[in-house]
Image (tube, grey):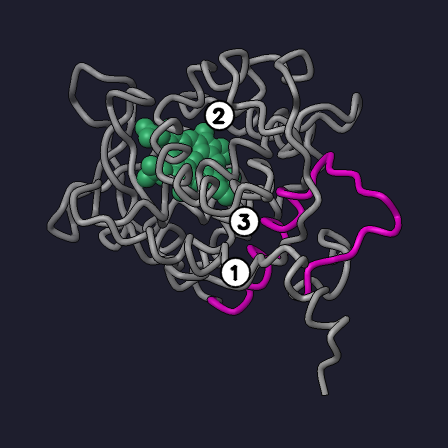
């Protein structure tokens, strides 16, 4: 039977499951994009984490530096103010959670709720008190570039070619907005469902879109104009990336489990905790040890 002491402990234990439920409850948003803010929450978690540099052990999701102009104002982060705004009522309701934990957890919950895998998540990130520790701008990838740029950026974080391709599969979700990145349109006809669609699309024929905007590729075989960025095309043009693209297009299980492993690794980059830190119940082991 539960003792008085256990009950008191339960009350004081941060209730991450309650936060997860509240995140799940705000995803459906009929007036926003394709009816869900899930994709932009995934992008928030990724951009919070993707500034990591393994040489200097700087950047990463710890700190929630995007709250400050130094990082939030990086043109690469345009549009993510919407994601942060959507999460603000949840922060107000659960003020004990740090922004850095909330943003990464929101990405994990959104992936799961949109039909994706369970990505391990562990709390314990802290928020910077000011912007002095924000990473320099320019560390996130530029969609206008090619394979060597992808390797430069993702090797800096400590990822390999297979992990780069697995992560890119998140582009089954969401869309580009001309007023944010300059690019326009979705990659998939089901942008609010986590799937292998992005990899299947590589079998299509893509041509340069004729428009005023930056170079992007288009295909209308599925009745709707879908898009690929130059960096997406790099995955099928590069002979080392291509085998993983083909594999993930055919093997859903492999993609889901590799994606879960690499996304968990991404959101752990640069995060350090006290040894005696008590893990969340959903965490069975240290994220990122799989590979
Ligand atoms: Fe991405 N991404 N991404 N991306 N991304 C954009 C949107 C999303 C690149 C460029 C862009 C990842 C990797 C890359 C998402 C998840 C991930 C946009 C449009 C560009 C440009 C932004 C806009 O206009 O709103 C490039 C380059 C790379 C290099 O690899 C990775 C890794 C992930 C996650 C694991 C998601 C989700 C979106 C949709 C956001 C939305 O608002 O719908």
Cα distance between the residues tagged 1 and 2: 23 Å
Q: Is residue 264 above or below residue 130?
A: below
In the rendered structure, the answer to whether residue 213 lies left or right of residue 236 reads left
Quarter in which the C terminus is drawn: bottom right
In the rendered structure, the answer to whether residue 121 lies left or right of residue 115 reads right
Is disc 2 surrounded by few (<14), some (14 to 19) or many (20+) residues within 10 Å? some
Nearer to us in this view, 177 or 272: 272
Residue 100 drawn at (x, y percent): 59, 36
In the rendered structure, the answer to whether residue 192 lies left or right of residue 105 reads left
* Residue 240 appears anywhere in the view: no
Residue 287 drawn at (x, y percent): 71, 54
In the rendered structure, the answer to whether residue 199 lies left or right of residue 71 reads left
Does the magenta segment cover residue 205?
no
The answer to whether the residues at label 1 and label 2 have Cβ atoms under 8 Å apart is no
Where is mark 2, residue-wise? 146
Q: Which residues are magenta?
A: 252-281
Report helix, strand or loop for mark 2: loop
Circle on res. 240: none
């Amino acid at each position: 039977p539960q003792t008085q002491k256990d009950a008191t402990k339960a009350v004081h234990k941060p209730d991450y499951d309650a936060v997860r439920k509240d995140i799940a409850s705000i995803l459906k948003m009929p007036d926003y994009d394709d009816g869900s803010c899930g994709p932009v929450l995934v992008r928030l978690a990724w951009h919070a984490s993707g500034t990591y540099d393994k040489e200097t052990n700087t950047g990463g999701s710890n700190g929630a530096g995007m709250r400050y102009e130094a990082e939030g104002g990086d043109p690469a982060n345009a549009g993510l103010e919407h994601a942060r705004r959507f999460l603000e009522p949840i922060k107000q309701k659960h003020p004990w959670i740090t922004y850095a934990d909330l943003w990464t957890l929101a990405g994990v919950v959104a992936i799961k709720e949109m039909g994706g895998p369970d990505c391990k998540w562990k709390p314990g990130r802290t928020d910077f008190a000011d912007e002095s520790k924000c990473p320099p701008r320019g560390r996130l990838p530029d969609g206008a570039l090619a394979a060597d740029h992808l390797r430069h950026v993702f090797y800096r974080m400590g990822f390999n070619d297979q992990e780069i391709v697995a992560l890119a599969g998140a582009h089954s979700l969401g869309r580009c907005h001309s007023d944010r990145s300059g690019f326009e349109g979705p990659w998939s006809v089901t942008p609010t469902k986590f799937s292998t669609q992005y990899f299947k699309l590589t079998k299509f024929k893509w041509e340069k879109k004729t428009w005023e905007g930056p170079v992007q590729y288009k295909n209308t075989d599925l009745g709707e104009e879908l898009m690929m960025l130059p960096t997406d095309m790099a995955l099928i043009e590069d002979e080392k990336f291509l085998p993983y693209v083909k594999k993930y297009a055919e093997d859903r299980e492999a993609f889901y489990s590799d994606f879960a492993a690499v996304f968990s690794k991404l959101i752990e980059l640069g995060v350090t905790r006290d040894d005696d830190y008590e893990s969340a119940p959903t965490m069975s082991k240290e994220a990122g040890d799989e590979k």
